């Protein structure tokens, strides 16, 4: 079946603009994760959704970042008033149930803030 | 809080040489450890997990609770092993994985 998909694949924006990144998880996976991959910084956890539970937002770097997951499926990560330091690859992953289950990653969205 | 440390950002070895990618973790309980790999222009994917005790693509990793380590090893590196490798930890109290900063492995011909 189809894997995790993300859109857009590339996004170039100007400092101060808002951006929305989309993630379509694997059907049937109840857990969904957002990560940020920066050069030299590795993989930084942002937010985790599990079923109908309240999301774990502990990794969001500032209140400019938010995410939602509608209908337990598609998720959108929104960055308001983008800054140059937000430039990175944003990865989405899904797993069957928990963080201990194999996570399947999407191809990522490369965000460039000019 | 749990933490994963990969001390080497870059590692180069020659084809046919042994390779070891280091991973240390801090967690007081019983963790689950994983290695994820990202080949060039491919998605990040699971390589192996310690509870499976299996060898994938010739790689093995043993959890050493005394040294809190989970080093990834392969006796004879191949050029196709060149990739970014991430060590990750899952603890019972967390709902997500904690990843290390990654090691870029280059296998030279």
Image (spheres, grey):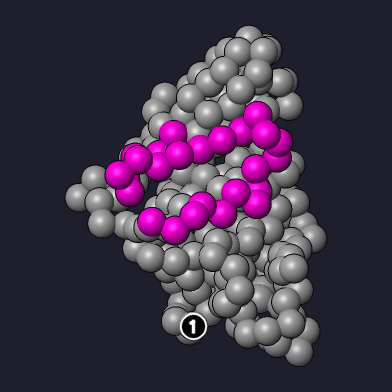
- Residue B9 can be seen in this image: yes
Which element is circle 1 on? Answer: helix
Q: Check the image and report above or below for B87 versus B30.
A: above
Give whichever of B76, B22 is nearer the camera: B22
Horizontal placement of A75 versus A44: left or right? left
x and y percentages locating residue A59 in the rendered image: 65, 49
x and y percentages locating residue B62 in the rendered image: 61, 82
x and y percentages locating residue A74 in the rendered image: 34, 40
Q: Check the image and report above or below for B57 versus B53.
A: above
Please tell me whether residue A78 belongs to the stretch shown in magenta: no
- Residue B105 can be seen in this image: no
Give whichever of A29, B61 is nearer the camera: A29
Q: Which residue bears the numbered disc 1?
A: B51
x and y percentages locating residue A80 in the rendered image: 61, 22
Q: Residue at x 39, y 28 (%)?
A: A7
Start-end of magenta stretch: A52-76
Q: Check the image and report above or below for B94 versus A54.
A: below
């Amino acid at each position: 079946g189809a894997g995790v998909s993300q859109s857009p694949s590339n996004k170039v924006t100007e400092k101060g603009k808002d951006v929305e990144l989309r993630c379509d998880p694997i059907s049937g996976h109840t857990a969904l994760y957002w990560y940020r991959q920066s050069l030299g910084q590795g993989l930084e956890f942002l937010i985790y959704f599990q079923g109908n539970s309240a999301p774990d937002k502990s990794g969001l770097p500032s209140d400019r970042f938010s995410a939602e997951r509608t209908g337990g499926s598609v998720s959108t990560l929104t960055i308001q008033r983008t800054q140059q330091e937000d430039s990175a690859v944003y990865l989405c992953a899904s797993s069957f149930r928990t963080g201990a289950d194999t996570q399947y990653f999407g191809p990522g969205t490369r965000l460039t803030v000019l | 809080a749990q933490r994963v440390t990969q001390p080497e950002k870059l590692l180069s070895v020659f084809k046919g040489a042994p390779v070891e990618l280091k991973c240390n973790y801090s967690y007081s309980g019983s963790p689950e450890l994983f290695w994820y790999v990202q080949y060039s222009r491919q998605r990040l994917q699971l390589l192996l997990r310690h509870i499976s005790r299996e060898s994938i693509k010739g790689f093995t990793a043993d959890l050493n609770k005394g040294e809190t380590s989970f080093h990834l090893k392969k006796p004879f590196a191949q050029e196709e092993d060149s990739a970014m490798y991430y060590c990750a930890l899952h603890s019972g109290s967390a709902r997500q994985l904690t990843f290390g900063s990654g090691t870029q492995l280059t296998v030279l011909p």
